[in-house]
Structure formats: structure tokens, C-alpha cells
């Protein structure tokens, strides 16, 4: 199953994304359909990104460890180990690059499964190349290339500090390692301290779309944050029953 190919508009301006050191963004594309990986490679090379491809889960793991991609496009259905297992092993290695899942399945459960496994976004086949590239650019801005939309990149709530420029988080001076989606969720909460944010608001802001009313993804990522931010410390992330979530300084 191949993506819908939309050609770039003639003369349409593009803002190229690059790594912090000025080198090309690195993308790993994992799918066993060579026609699809060829098309994706072509589209991503147009963005001036460096692309590697893999046709199996084992190849993906080997390439990821050597190539150190900035973002990964990962098919769920692979001939050896599935994409969920690939992601689990990548995360077990301590590698937090954002992952966009490709899936031929169009059910809510399958979409949520990819995200709850630690993925950051998904597209359902068939998809447009323009949409996929736009999703990747969004993930990259969140994880590495985002331009802060406030004059002060440092957000502080109590002893919790988030740096929007360096994408570093500290609690009581101790570093906290977050995935791209966890970081975006925490940033949204910290930009609105002591304000109750509904699950619908969080879905719209962090994922830019909803899940047909499902709240399980928000609940899961809130639990991830609590384990990393609040574990062994006075809690800062609070549930307001029937309303949503908020962050406030520990008392």
C-alpha cells in the first residue's frame, strides 16, 4: 500500500529544518515495502534530510544504533518483529528520538497502541507525503528544532524547571529525561500553572487532533510524567476529578 503522492507547489517557499550543529536532519524509515520507502526517501531528501531505510525490525535496530536518527518513521507490521517491539527495544537502549508509526489498520485501538507503546504520532496508510512530512517537521520542532514562542525560554514552577531552548528539565536540580511528547505535555502544563486543563484541551494542544473522545492516551502520558517528575517527591501534577489536570508547586 503506497502513499498518495502530492507534488510540491512550484515556487512554494520552504523553511528547511537542520540540526543544531547545522548538519542535515537524520531520518530512519522502516517498512518492508520498497516502493514506499523509495517514495518516502525522495520526499525527505527534498527536505534536505539524510535518510536511511530498513526493511525489517532487526535491520532497523542495527541502523538506529549506528545512525542515531533524529526521527524515525516505523511501520507496525514488519516481517520479523513488529514495530511495537522495535520501539520497545529502542527505548530500552535509552534512545528517545520521536517515532511516527505507519499503520494499515484504521481502528482507534491500533492507533492508541502505537502511542501508548512510546510512539509520538501516527499516520494511517494510504497517506499523503505532504501530511507525513508535516507531521515529521512538527515532531522535530518539539524535540530539537522548536522555536520558543515566549521571550523567556525558562519555565519554572516550584522546583521544576523546563528550558524550551535546550529541551532540558530539572526537578530540585536533578535532570529528568523525557520523550518529545512527554516534554510537550509538561510544557503545556507549565505554561498554565495552577490552571485546570481538560483532556480535550491537552489532546488538541499536544497531539493536534483528538481520538474520537478517548482519554486513555492523556491518562497514560500523565502517568508517565508522574513517574518521572513526582516519584519519591511531593506531587506537582494533580488530577481534578471530572475536570482535568494541572501542575502547581509542591507544598
Image (cartoon, rainbow, N blue to C red):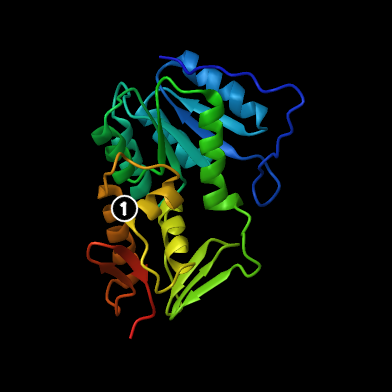
The residue under the point 66% across, 44% down is 18
Residue at the limit of the structure toward the front, as seen here: 242
Q: Quadrant of the N terminus?
A: top left
Name the quarter where the C terminus is drawn.
bottom left
Q: Residues within 10 Å of mark 1 (few under 14, many from 20)?
A: many
Q: Which residue is mark 1?
A: 218
Task: Return the x and y of residue 79 as percentages of the image width and height.
Answer: 31, 21
Residue 103 vs 166, above or below: the answer is above
Q: Residue furthest right?
A: 11
Question: Looking at the picture, does residue 117 appear above or below residue 129?
Answer: below
Q: Is residue 210 above or below residue 56?
A: below
Q: Let me know if residue 137 appears in the view.
A: yes
Considering depth in this image, is 180 or 173 the residue closer to the camera?
180
Residue 154 place in picture, x, y as percent: 57, 71
Q: Quadrant of residue 239?
A: bottom left
Residue visible at 27% across and 49% down in the picture: 215
What residue is at 46 percent from the left and 41 percent from the top? 65
- Please state if 176 lies on the left or on the right of 211 as rendered: right
Residue 68 appears in view? no
Q: x%, y% of residue 44?
A: 60, 29
Secondary structure state at the residue bearing disc 1:
helix
Between 245 and 98, the one nearer to me in the picture: 245
- Residue 47 image-quadrant placement: top right
Residue 41: which quarter of the image?
top right
Amino acid at each position: 500500500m503506497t502513499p498518495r503522492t502530492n507534488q510540491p507547489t512550484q515556487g512554494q517557499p520552504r523553511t528547511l529544518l537542520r540540526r543544531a550543529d547545522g548538519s542535515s536532519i537524520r531520518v530512519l524509515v522502516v517498512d518492508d515495502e520498497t516502493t514506499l520507502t523509495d517514495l518516502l526517501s525522495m520526499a525527505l531528501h527534498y527536505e534536505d534530510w539524510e535518510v536511511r531505510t530498513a526493511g525489517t525490525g532487526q535491520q532497523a535496530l542495527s541502523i538506529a544504533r549506528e545512525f542515531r536518527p533524529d526521527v524515525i518513521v516505523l511501520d507496525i507490521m514488519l516481517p520479523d518483529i513488529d514495530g511495537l517491539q522495535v520501539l520497545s527495544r529502542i527505548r530500552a537502549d535509552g534512545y528517545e528520538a520521536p517515532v511516527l508509526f505507519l499503520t494499515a489498520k484504521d481502528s482507534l485501538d491500533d492507533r492508541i497502541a502505537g502511542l501508548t507503546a512510546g510512539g509520538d504520532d501516527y499516520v494511517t496508510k494510504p497517506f499523503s507525503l505532504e501530511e507525513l512530512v508535516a507531521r515529521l517537521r512538527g515532531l522535530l520542532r518539539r524535540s530539537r528544532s522548536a522555536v520558543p514562542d515566549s521571550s523567556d525560554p525558562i519555565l519554572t514552577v516550584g522546583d521544576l524547571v523546563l528550558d524550551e531552548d535546550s529541551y532540558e528539565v530539572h526537578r530540585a536540580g536533578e535532570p529528568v529525561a523525557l520523550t518529545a511528547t512527554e516534554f510537550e505535555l509538561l510544557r503545556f502544563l507549565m505554561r498554565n500553572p495552577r490552571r485546570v486543563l481538560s483532556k480535550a484541551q491537552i489532546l488538541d494542544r499536544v497531539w493536534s487532533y483528538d481520538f474520537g473522545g478517548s482519554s486513555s492516551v492523556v491518562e497514560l502520558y500523565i502517568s508517565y510524567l508522574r513517574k518521572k517528575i513526582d516519584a519519591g517527591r511531593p506531587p506537582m501534577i494533580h488530577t481534578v476529578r471530572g475536570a482535568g489536570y494541572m501542575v502547581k508547586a509542591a507544598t
